[in-house]
Amino acid sequence: MNSPRSILHVDMDAFYASVEQRDNPELRGKPVIVGGTSGRGVVAAASYEVRKFGVRSAMPIRRALTLCPHAICVRPRMRRYAEVSAQVFAIFNDYTPLVEGLSLDEAYLDVTASLGLKGDPLHIARDIKQRIAIETALTASVGVAGNKLVAKIASDLDKPDGLTVVTAETLQTVLDPLPVRRLPGLGRKKGEQVHAAGLTTLGARTRRRHRRSARHR
């Protein structure tokens, strides 16, 4: 019988914007947009200060500046972000060789085979977050679960600098109340179709199935 897997999804918080704020003290605590500086293009990253105004990644810069006219726009420095990303991934590889990078700022880590040496998944997650903070002066949010999908959802539940563990026992308690938009890769159009079908939360399908089963008993 296979033992349960332990998967971490580590997601750096507002990565590009956080690197800019770290490298330039004048930007700390300010609403920062990483993207075009001429009102063209899209938002590559938004600091948490500017997100309060409704600014999000992939939003047109012109729209973002309408929402937050006093936002500070910074040109992306991809080489710099790649350098910092390499530091973060080096930390990951100290805990497991099973690292699946999704981008410069997020990755899945399968730590199942590392538990005997590195401690339980919660200890590993805390240790990784602490090392990232010490070695890069940045924060990361981590989701811990038995599979990649749930770990990814969990990492987004307590941002920034969060840590959420979802076990088999707490799976439904944590996930069922969440809106369907939390499902990775759903997309706006498909999300509208799902809502139109009456499935507004992740647990809605399960409850509907239970009701149908009860009617046929």
Image: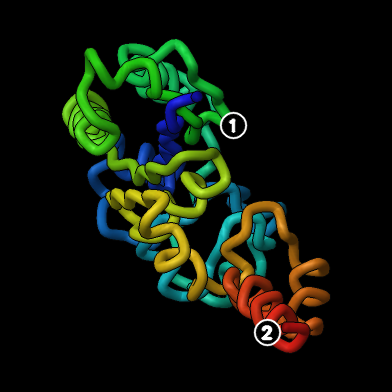
Dot 1 corresponds to which residue?
Answer: 102
Tell me which label, 2 or 1, sits earlier in the chain: 1
Dot 1 crowding, Cα within 10 Å, few <14, some 14–19, many 20+: few
Question: Is residue 132 toward the left or the right of residue 153 in the image?
Answer: left
Front position among marks 2 and 1: 2
Q: Residue at x 59, y 31 (%)?
A: 102
**Residue 169 in which image quadrant:** bottom left
Q: Which of the 4 quarters of the picture holds residue 180?
A: bottom right
> Would you identify the image quadrant in which residue 57 lies?
bottom right
Q: Is residue 93 above or below residue 161?
A: above
Badge 2 is on which residue? Answer: 214
Q: Residue at x 74, y 88 (%)?
A: 215
**Residue 203 in the image, given as x and y percentages of width and height:** 58, 72
The residue drawn where x is 54% and y is 39% is: 148
Which is nearer the eye, 9 or 86? 9
Can you give x and y, in whole percent of width and height, for residue 143 in the image?
39, 45
In percent of the image, x 58 and y 68: which residue is there?
64
Relative to 144, 54 lies left or right:
right
CA distance for labels 2 and 1: 42 Å
| Residue type of the residue flagged with mark 1 | Leu
